[in-house]
């Protein structure tokens, strides 16, 4: 790499698109957490259909809120994205296990979280195997240039 990850910059457009995209999973997780804290009528039925006892609602709500908060803080955003991915993986497995068609929503939300982070965090781009130039990755010296 020719530019240190710390010195890479993000365009204002990419930064704002990343922030807007990042807001989607954060708002969804916080809304879901709030519902688990409030435990409105009918939530027990939904938990029962998913095979989860209601006693886990508070813990899951705390976990969702914690993942969202960790993701929002720039210094811990990558850890937050990893935690969100794990949480949403569990949600996907739960929906698949009971045969609900909503199993696609969590992976889509996770992809949005990572795309938003990728657009707002330049250090993350350095970890991706994308090439930014057309020159070969390894330069081969010609015999004429090695003779002196």
Image: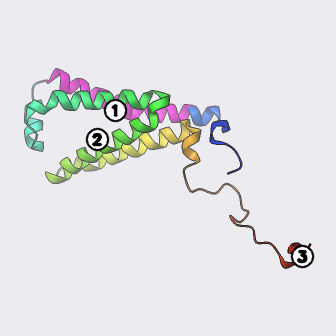
Q: Which residue in the structure is indicated by mark 1?
A: 67
> SS at mark 1?
helix
Q: Name the residue at 41% across, 32% down.
A: 71
The outermost residue toward the right is 148
Asked if residue 79 lies left or right of residue 46, the reply is right
Residues under numbered marks 1 and 2 in contact, where contact means CB atoms less than 8 Å apart = yes
Which span is picked out in magenta? Answer: 16-40
Res. 54 image quadrant: top left
Horizontal and vertical percent position of residue 121? 55, 37
Quarter occupied by the C terminus: bottom right
CA gap, disc 1 to disc 2? 8 Å
Q: Is residue 7 above or below residue 145?
A: above
Instruction: Pick whichever of labels 3 and 1 is earlier in the sequence.
Output: 1
Q: Is residue 47 above or below residue 129?
A: above
Instruction: Pick whichever of labels 3 and 2 is earlier in the sequence.
Output: 2
> SS at mark 2?
helix
Instruction: Pick whichever of labels 1 and 2 is earlier in the sequence.
Output: 1
Looking at the image, which is closer to me, 135 or 119?
135
Horizontal and vertical percent position of residue 65? 30, 27
Horizontal and vertical percent position of residue 66? 32, 28
Q: Name the residue at 18% across, 47% down.
A: 94
Q: Which residue in the structure is indicated by mark 3?
A: 147
Res. 123 image quadrant: top right
Horizontal and vertical percent position of residue 91? 24, 44
What type of secondary structure mainly makes up the magenta span? Answer: helix
Q: Which residue in the structure is indicated by mark 2?
A: 87
């Amino acid at each position: 790499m020719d530019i240190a990850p710390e010195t890479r910059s993000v365009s204002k457009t990419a930064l704002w698109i990343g922030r807007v995209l990042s807001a989607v999973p954060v708002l969804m997780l916080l809304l879901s957490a709030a519902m688990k804290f409030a435990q409105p009528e009918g939530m027990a039925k939904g938990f029962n259909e998913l095979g989860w006892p209601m006693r886990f609602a508070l813990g899951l709500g705390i976990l969702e809120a914690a993942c969202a908060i960790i993701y929002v803080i720039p210094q811990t955003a990558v850890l937050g994205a990893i935690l969100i991915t794990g949480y949403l993986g569990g949600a996907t497995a739960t929906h698949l296990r009971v045969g609900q068609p909503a199993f696609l929503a969590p992976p889509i939300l996770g992809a949005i979280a990572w795309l938003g982070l990728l657009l707002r965090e330049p250090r993350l781009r350095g970890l991706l195997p994308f090439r930014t130039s057309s020159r070969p990755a390894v330069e081969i010296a010609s015999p004429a240039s090695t003779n002196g």
